[in-house]
Image (spheres, helix red, strand yellow):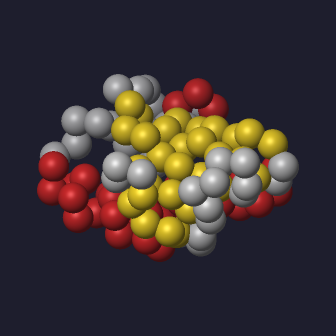
Amino acid sequence: MKKQSMNLNIRHDLPNEIWETVIPVIYESMEGWLGFENDGIPYWFSVDETQKHIWASVEPSGLLFVGVMKDDEWKQWKLEIKKIATQKLGFRVGEIELGEVDS
């Protein structure tokens, strides 16, 4: 397992109703969902950051996901959250840094 990260084009300035209703549905639909732990931080798989885990943070650059996973698991998890988020949000969700979406 190794440290993984991605920054999705889900902007911090989306309407509050999106952050309060749609984003939690996306989170909950993902494998490993644990809930909002440690002062409201979303976690998947474990809150122990020495174990397999993922957490997310809303940043000015987008929605940041950081975790520790095997490469193949991470690749699958990324594909799935991008697919679900695209369906739920109504715009193409991806990583700007990888050229998946417009900046």
Residue 38 left/right relative to 95? left
Residue 99: x percent and y percent? 59, 31
Which of the 4 quarters of the picture holds residue 77? Answer: bottom right
Q: Residue at x 45, y 31 (%)?
A: 102
Residue 54: x percent and y percent? 60, 52
Placement of 29 over or under 40, stated as above or below: below
Count every numbered label the image shows and give the total: 0
Placement of 12 over or under 46, stated as above or below: above
Residue 81: x percent and y percent? 53, 59
Which residue is nearer to you in this view: 72 or 46? 46
Residue 87: x percent and y percent? 41, 65
Q: Residue at x 43, y 66 (%)?
A: 35
Residue 85 left/right relative to 17? right
Residue 79, can we see it?
A: no
Which of the 4 quarters of the picture holds residue 48? Answer: bottom right
Q: Quadrant of the C terminus?
A: top left
Residue 25, can we see it?
A: yes
Which residue is nearer to you in this view: 76 or 2? 2
Residue 27 left/right relative to 7? left
Q: Residue at x 65, y 48 (%)?
A: 49
Q: Residue at x 73, y 55 (%)?
A: 51
